[in-house]
Amino acid sequence: MSGLGNQTSTAKKIPTTPVVEVNNLSGLGNQTSTAKKIPTTPVVEVNNLSGLGNQIPTQKKQELLGLSGVTVEKFWEIINPVILMEGRKKKEEARGDFSQPSISILTPTWNSSLDWFVETVLSVLNQSIPNWEWCIVDDGSKQSEIRNVLAGLAEKESRIKVLFSEDNGGISAATNKALNMAKGEFICLLDHDDTLAPTALENSLDKLVEGFDVVYSDEDKIDFSGLNYIHPFFKPDWSPEYFRGVMYVGHLLCVRREIALVAGGFKSEFDGVQDYEFMLRVSEQTNKIAHIYKHLYHWRQVQGSISGDADAKAGIEVVQQAAVNAHLERIGLAAKAEPGLGKHRVNINPLPRKNYPLISLIIASPHISESLAQWLENFLSISTYPENEVILIGGNDAENLIENPAVKVLSLPGKFNYSRAYNLGAKTAQGDYFVFLNINLEPAVEDWQRHLLYYAEQSDIGAVGGLLVFPNGTVEHAGIVLGKSGKVNYVMRGFPTNDDGYAGSLVCAREVSALSRDCLMVSRENFELVGGFNEHFFSDYQDVDLCLKLRKKGKRILLTPRCVLINHESEKHRQENYDVVDYMLLLDQWQIYMDLGDPYWSRGVGE
């Protein structure tokens, strides 16, 4: 696929219509009458991610047993009363035999421990709705205990279907057999040692019937003792770019059965990351993907499993990268998946280009001096992208202050307005792509523009920004989070630049709600689509407004940590740019949307 750098227009189309619950911003611009009282401290840094699990309302969970040494007899002593109770409910409520279930649970088993499997069974039997079936495929177990209990379950509970394979074909082959057994409109995946929350199927179906093809939930873990729920994982709403770098969807995953079959089921060559690779292919079939903000799945920590040790499966990153590379090739993106920083992380590296569209670097500053000219010369000497033009917008009579024929200098009369300055620069620009830049930046990587352009060229991406860091090596800007009560949060500020962030959010490209204008690339087409910057914003928040307007048009906003720039601007200067009137205008336009919470930064992680 070498030389495909400019061939994004021929890429296979994947659905780009925004998911309703995530990106439907229509009609929000003028709904100002119900705005809440404006907080006096709007900008908040989110950099403490510890202890955040307690910020979510508690939900009902199955009581853990933490058993050991469970025999077949003990298993039935625990399970029989539950099956009998279910039988009585069927008769009392005339619920029928559910020959056409709504959802099918797929579970492969292999030499499963009854200590754990008994709790898996309880979690299914105790579901809050009855219209499910459980398709279990035993993948050649040699232990008679698990085979005996499986046969008994199928005999005693009509909703449980069991298939015994003589040979061990692997987890993907067994899951495909279970998929072929399924009759439900939807399927979900459950491992033989994990458990479901009591309302897992009900909550999933409630969301699916809204018109979604796929739903996934938050999850947590069962600790090694088997007695405690630990490590709650709060996921973002569907984020396709982030998913290419981080296997974040995980469990509970429910998919429309027809789409699972069209996608081709599970592939044995990707055993170890089979659910992840399956979801990559599913995402090529539909964009109707929803996220449930509840921990509906409990992943058991087991020795020898990634749940208990991230290093448990040697070579897993190689298989993960192969899955992403196959996905990139199928959808026609000219990039290669490479090892990322941290465990189970993938970097997306654009392939070499054959052509280089002109990029217009647009810089606005009310005060232009000789030191600015020297900064600009140093800045351009570090960057390796060959086709740039520079447009510098200053205050009154700025044209003659920069003696560099490669720089076009414009004057903006009157009180300096950053939005108006950027719009003037964009009207003058000749490039198809604009990069709005703050002064005092220093590229930390010479190919920073290459990584921005790779994303900006994709038709469903509205804007892309880079990772901005302080001179001391800590994070300044890694995306903007919008929260309730009008909060505008600079997430993970102060983190070391080599930190993983929350679940890879600092080392992998990901969707965000908004970006800083200090380093913001947008195509001319997208910039004109939303009318450029709103010139009612004089100093601040025009970047947030621009990103929200692009999202309202169904575009994604991305941050890539492969583009890194050092910001030498002082904190005093940043504070001087803050304008409370600009902030009030932002709330006037967008507070109702902001109060819904940020789709790309889970409310459980904190705002």
Image (tube, rainbow, N blue to C red):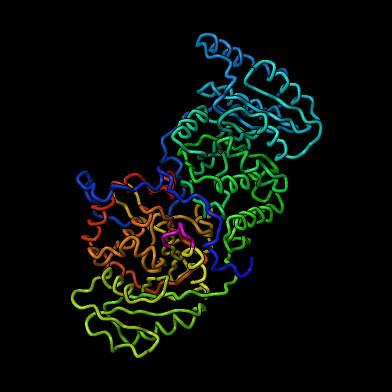
Residue in the picture at 63% in, 29% down: 182
Residue in the picture at 41% in, 66% down: 523
At which x and y percent is residue 287? 49, 46
User: Looking at the image, can residue 145 be seen?
Assistant: yes
In the image, residue 268 sits, relative to residue 576, either above or below, namely above
Q: How many marks?
A: 0
At which x and y percent is residue 443? 47, 75
Residue in the picture at 56% in, 28% down: 103
In the image, residue 584 sits, relative to residue 382, either above or below, namely above
**Which is more toward the observer, 86 or 487?**
86
At which x and y percent is residue 582? 24, 61
User: Looking at the image, can residue 45 be seen?
Assistant: no
On the image, which quarter does residue 184 sit in?
A: top right
Q: State which region is magenta.
A: 458-463
Q: Look at the image and say whether residue 381 sits in the magenta stretch.
A: no
The N terminus sits in image quarter: bottom right
In the rendered view, does 41 fall on the left or right side of 131? Answer: left
In the rendered view, does 62 fall on the left or right side of 274? Answer: left
Residue in the picture at 46% in, 64% down: 456
At which x and y percent is residue 133? 60, 24
